[in-house]
Image (cartoon, helix red, strand yellow):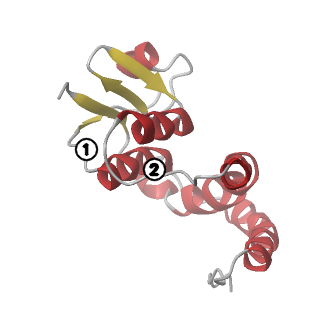
């Protein structure tokens, strides 16, 4: 098999998603740590974000494209639903996570809590506090749409 490489920051939720898709398919891969906006990452991903992906001479960026490629290019259990309606719902929720949930849950909560380690600054407590009602609303939506409740203590 040609070399499979994921380029990104290991703790990035998007890098994790690409890696999980590869693990689910049973694909061996190399993880190359590459920070956003470095020369390497800018060459692989025109917007300098993470992750980027290489399979032999073929390269991709954007997590959704990487995961879809992994599902279709490699043997192993299907990662996508079978029916068009189920795939559309999958796309709908992936888009919602990227467009809505990520801002409140990751940017305004998680990254702010990790600010001392990542950005070498104190967390912005006002930003965190402003995220909590949005997160509560978003989790409520997931709870109503899912058979399993989303448990997160926001107190």
In screen coordinates, is 99 left or right of 117?
A: right
- Tag shown at residue 125: none
Label 1 packing within 10 angstroms: few (<14), some (14-19), many (20+): some
Residues under labels 2 and 1: Cα distance? 14 Å
Mark 2 lies on residue? 17
* Residue at screen point 34% across, 55% down: 24
- In the orientation shown, which residue stands out farthest toward the front? 83
Q: Residue at x 47, y 41 (%)?
A: 67
- Disc 2 on helix, strand or loop? helix
Q: Residues within 10 Å of mark 2 (few under 14, many from 20)?
A: some
Q: Is residue 38 visible?
A: no
Q: Residue most toward the left?
A: 1
Q: Is residue 27 above or below residue 130?
A: above
Residue 139 in picture, x, y percent from top left: 73, 73
Which of label 2 and label 1 is nearer to you?
1
In the picture, the disc for residue 27 is 1
């Amino acid at each position: 098999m040609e070399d499979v490489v994921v380029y990104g920051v290991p703790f990035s939720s998007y890098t994790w998603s690409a890696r999980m898709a590869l693990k689910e398919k049973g694909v061996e891969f190399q993880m190359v740590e590459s920070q956003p906006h470095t020369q390497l990452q800018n060459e692989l991903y025109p917007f300098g974000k993470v992750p980027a992906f290489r399979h032999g001479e073929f390269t991709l960026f954007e997590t959704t494209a990487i995961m879809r490629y992994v599902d279709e290019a490699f043997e192993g259990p299907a990662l996508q639903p079978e029916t068009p309606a189920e795939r559309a719902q999958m796309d709908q929720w992936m888009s919602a996570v990227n467009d809505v949930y990520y801002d409140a849950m990751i940017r305004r909560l998680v990254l702010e809590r990790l600010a001392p380690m990542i950005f070498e600054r104190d967390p912005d407590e006002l930003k965190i506090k402003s995220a909590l009602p949005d997160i509560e609303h978003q989790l409520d939506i997931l709870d109503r749409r899912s058979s399993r409740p989303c448990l997160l203590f926001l107190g």
